[in-house]
Image (tube, helix red, strand yellow):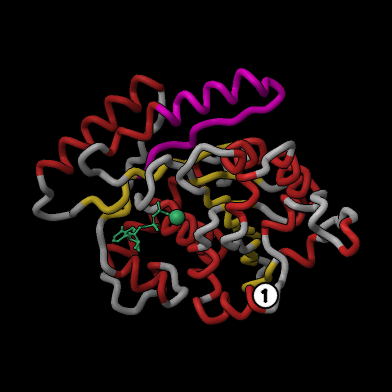
Amino acid sequence: MAITVSTINMKGGVGKTTLTFNLAWYSAWKATLKVLAIDLDPQANLSQYFMGAVEYLQYIRKSKKTVVDIFEQFSAASGLSGSPELVEPEDVIHSLYEWEDGSLLHLIPSRLELAWTLKNPTEKAQLLPKFIAKIADNYDLILIDCAPTESILTTAAYRSSRYVVVPVKPEFLATIGLPLLARSLKEFALMHQDQQLDMAGIIFNGLKRTNTPPEQINSCRDVKELADEHGWHVFDNSAHHSDSYPTGSRDGKPIFMTSNARAYVKTEFHEVGQEFLERINLV
Ligand SMILES: Nc1ncnc2c1ncn2[C@@H]1O[C@H](COP(=O)(O)OP(=O)(O)O)[C@@H](O)[C@H]1O
Ligand SMILES: [Mg+2]
């Protein structure tokens, strides 16, 4: 059965999508796992990284199913004549790669209309974990890329997950979302005592390797202090700043397949990926 991990931080632009994309690739390509990535952000950046902007647009234009259809299965608006229409896994799971060694990379894409789910939440949060339970045996790892807001989508992600992993960009006010996250995890644990949800750790992303500005050094110190207070692990390895991350994402390639990425950047991400799999007990 798959281990499900959500990438979360209440702050935007910290590398949630970049890390989800690269960790999913790492787990499938380097660790030969069966990986499903779920895009749970209405911005659909992860979908575009995996599919490429053009193919993604075609997918949406053809009205193919997305994660929105999982949440709207029972809404009056879905289905012909307004009757509920159950989503079949094969309709919503987009197969990206399947290799001969058995490893694979699949995606459940998102679309902007996911924001609509937030307008009319009702009991929808349960629909994602229910859907995942049906398909969990087909995968080793399910990675969920979350939106940077506390919403029914966060609850759905938590409800589906065994672990959360938290990318943090060391910058001014980097700690600002973390107390909120701590509160949200604590509240969740109180309300769902039937479920174990653990913090796999904080991953620093975007740290400057050389000439590290004092702002980043101070920020790392503050984040570590806060992590200590909450008993959270901080990854020993981090994904430093590299222009190859945006370049790779644009080309649909993980950092270790990006031709102009420096060797140390690739090696470093290998260490991040390895530590990630160790933290979630997949090695
Ligand atoms: N380690 C990194 N080095 C350089 N740029 C990065 C790095 N990580 C992310 N980025 C860039 O920063 C921006 C925000 O990253 P993203 O993963 O979209 O954050 P989030 O999902 O948290 O909003 C993107 O343009 C991305 O390409
Ligand atoms: Mg994102």
Q: Determine the image quadrant of residue 31.
A: bottom right
x, y (%) of residue 162?
A: 61, 37
Q: Is residue 196 in the magenta section?
A: yes
Magenta region, residue range = 180-203
Q: Determine the image quadrant of residue 181.
A: top left
For label 1, the crowd category at 10 Å Cα-Cα, with few meaning under 14, some 14 to 19 and many 20 or more, is: few
Name the secondary structure under disc 1. loop
Which image quarter has ligand 2? bottom left
Left or right of 102, for residue 76: right
Q: Is residue 72 above or below residue 49?
A: above
Q: Residue at x 47, y 74 (%)?
A: 252
Question: Dot 1 corresponds to which residue?
Answer: 100
Q: Amino acid at mark 1?
A: Glu
x, y (%) of residue 92?
A: 73, 64
Residue 126 vs residue 240, the one in the foreground: 126
x, y (%) of residue 40?
A: 58, 52
Left or right of 239, for residue 183: right
Left or right of 164, for residue 114: right
Q: Is residue 60 above or below residue 167?
A: below
x, y (%) of residue 47?
A: 55, 66
Q: Residue at x 11, y 47 (%)?
A: 213
Q: Residue at x 73, y 48 (%)?
A: 132
